[in-house]
Amino acid sequence: MKNSFKNLSYQELKVKREELRKKYMEFRFKIVLGNVDNPLQKRVVRRQIARLNTLIHAHEKAEQKAAQTKFEGAK
């Protein structure tokens, strides 16, 4: 599961992050109510969100660097 996000596009990463955020919120509510079979799943989802955030940030940095290089090349 760790490497399954690397081949996704930028937009797919953002959509997946939103899905996992919703899932994480559901886990939080279920834990409070006591209806969770595996409470450690919350940690797994939180770490997946962190991985997605890292990949999204890397995409943004790459785009920013490409734009900066393009701008410097035009001078």
Image (cartoon, helix red, strand yellow):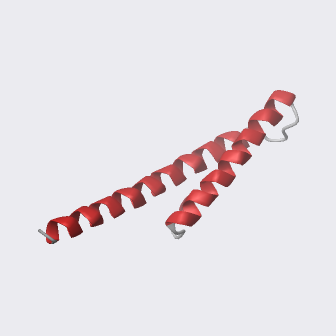
Q: Residue furthest top?
A: 32
**Residue at the spot x=86%, y=29% of the render?**
33
Task: Tell me if 2 is positioned left or right of 27 in this view.
Answer: left
Q: Measured from the top left, where is residue 64 in percent x and y?
A: 32, 59
Q: In the rendered image, which quarter contains the C terminus?
A: bottom left
Image x and y of residue 22, in percent: 71, 46
Q: Is residue 59 left or right of residue 53?
A: left
Asked if residue 61 can be seen in this view, the reply is yes
**Which of these two is toward me, 38 or 65?**
65
Residue closer to the observer: 72 or 16: 72
**Above or below, 4 relative to 44:** below
**Compared to 23, does 63 lie above or below?**
below
Q: Residue furthest front?
A: 75
How many marks overall?
0
Q: Position of residue 27 (x, y in %)?
A: 76, 40
Please give the name of the residue rendered at 70% of the width and 42% of the height, measured from the top-left corner. Answer: 24
Residue 4 shows in the view:
no
Q: Picture coordinates of residue 73 (x, y %)? A: 15, 71
Looking at this view, is 27 or 10 the one in front?
A: 10
Q: Residue at x 47, y 57 (%)?
A: 55
Q: For the point 75% across and 35% down, which residue is it?
A: 28
Seen in the image, is 50 located left or right of residue 38?
left
